[in-house]
Amino acid sequence: MTDTSSGQIVTRFAPSPTGYLHVGGARTALFNWAYAKHHGGRFILRIEDTDQLRSSEESTRKIVQDLAWLGIDWDEGPDPKAANPYATQLGDQGPYFQSQRLGIYREYVQRLLDRKLAYEAFETSTELAARREVSIKATGSYYYDPTEALSLTPDQISKFKDEGRPYVVRFRVPDKKFVVDDQVLGRVEIGRPEIEDFVIWKADGYPTYHFAVVVDDILMGVTDVLRGQEHLMNTPKHIALYEALEVAPPRYSHLPLIFNPDGSKMSKRDKAKTAREAARKWLGEHGNDHGGLAAAAEITEPELEGFLKKKNDDNQITASLARVTGTHLPEIDIHDFRASGYLPEALVCYLALLGWSPKNDLEEIDLSVLARMFDIDGIHRSAARFDRSKLLAFNADAIRRLAADDFASRLRDYLAEFQPEYVERLDGDQFRHFAAAYKVRARTLAEPAEAGRFFISDDNSIVYDNTAAKKALLAHESEGLHTLAALVPELQQIDPWSVENLEKSMAEVMQSLSANLGKVGQPLRVAVSGGAVTPPLYETLVILGKEHVLRRIERCLGTFAAEERR
């Protein structure tokens, strides 16, 4: 367990705003948040946006929104309530965007240059690539040789700068081993030649990740760094920089990787891979019609070809091909899980148990429990497997635990964001019935919309299931069709249109026809939904509304009366 007697614990989560928040990043944020809360410390959200080509304000906004949706808050960082996260920031250690801290980084780079612990290097990328090729052919490996850069005189460096030559600043790595006493993985030692003189300042005028993250952690007082195991080999570089800057490094804890059930790393590329496989299958079924697929996906043929040849994993192309092929893409980002209808508390519970175990083997964990119980001791060393079926079970259990009004409110908010046609079509009372009808069977907030699509379909576009229609309407000399016709005048008289009045009216019809609910209800169910399965019949009729029910019956009677005559 970490010794916290020396001062306040300070952790941070520092994502790059180059897309949506990956589920692995969300778990890292969750563990950093929980560790700080458990020890009464501070949790910082810092945005590492020095990659100017890929970073965007929109991605920052999405990351902030997704963290807030999960219930993860921070003591310092972008203001989650601000429309523009760059405009308002919380805390006095900022700014919390690396793009706004360039003056700070320049000062620290100059410190290292003045002490001869870093140097300017003017080799071009073409020159370095050629050297790499020669070295690999000769020895099978390549390490940067600083001889040329270190031989430059101050006059030569000034001359090159006056000429406008691009250059980088490299850190002069000492010839020694650097020790990482990782709290999860144990002791790791690495040094030269594995660590070459690495770049800390790029030719575009921005610091590299390695340099900026160390300077930021020093100035923001970060005491503990919890991050993914993929960063483990970066840590000796960071410790080398801490030593050069004469500051004690934080404690490091590297978290287990997250794998798919098949053992492959869970990656954003999984979505493109799935879409690529679906596209190839579609082409096989459609005579290899690349032009047709490209047109249907609203992309160009060269874009399609590039995607199929793995030259890019473009998100828009991925989504378009998934739409055309009817493919469900695997959830990878937090936004994917939101769009698929997962509850934040279910996702938090599952992520908390993905690579960490509480001492009492709890499986129902919320943020308050996590903050109370989380510590480094429970983090696993081995990779975690992301089991979507288990997450789905967690989510179904969470939905079942919701009160009816809470579920209706959550469902409305979800549909307003992702399928607004439902809240536009169903008024307050109708929507309450809709939510109640699906709560008992829903595993996600998306499933009611998938199963209940007929509720918001145009009355004249209902597609009838032939088997259900023939059985319910045309069997036994069209008994169901005649029953349906007999229902119309009874339904027209019902006012107000309610479950109670529908039950009463239907009971009278059944008595007059000497029929049970199945013989009366199934024709009505097929007429209004097109199929044999709906939520409870009276709730279904109330959700649809009187006018829509009568119009659908009228259309059904006209459609199948003509078929009966044939």
Image (cartoon, helix red, strand yellow):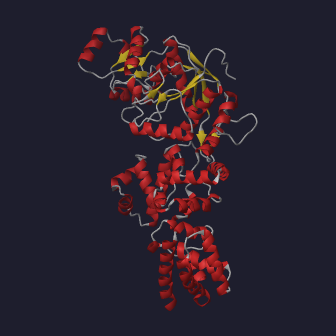
Q: Is residue 396 above or below residue 532?
A: above
Name the residue located 47 percent from the left edge and 84 percent from the top edge: 558
Residue 25, quarter of the rendered image: top right
Residue 56, quarter of the rendered image: top left
Closest to the observer: 369 or 119?
369
Q: Is residue 140 above or below residue 267?
A: above
For residue 322, side relative to residue 348 (left or right): left
Q: Is residue 157 above or below residue 301?
A: above
User: Looking at the picture, how far across and down is residue 40, in whole percent?
Assistant: 63, 24
Closest to the observer: 318 or 512?
512
Closest to the observer: 499 or 297?
499
Q: Is residue 11 visible?
A: yes
For residue 316, side relative to residue 541 (left or right): left
Residue furthest right as drawn: 360
User: Looking at the picture, how far across and down is residue 129, in whole percent?
Assistant: 37, 29
User: Looking at the picture, how far across and down is residue 64, in whole percent?
Assistant: 48, 37
Name the residue located 43 percent from the left edge and 56 percent from the top edge: 321
User: Looking at the picture, how far across and down is residue 366, in whole percent?
Assistant: 65, 39
Number of numbered discs visible in the structure rendering: 0
Q: Is residue 18 visible?
A: no
Name the residue located 38 percent from the left edge and 21 percent from the top edge: 102
Residue furthest left as drawn: 163
Instruction: Please identify the quadrant where the N terminus is shown.
Output: top right
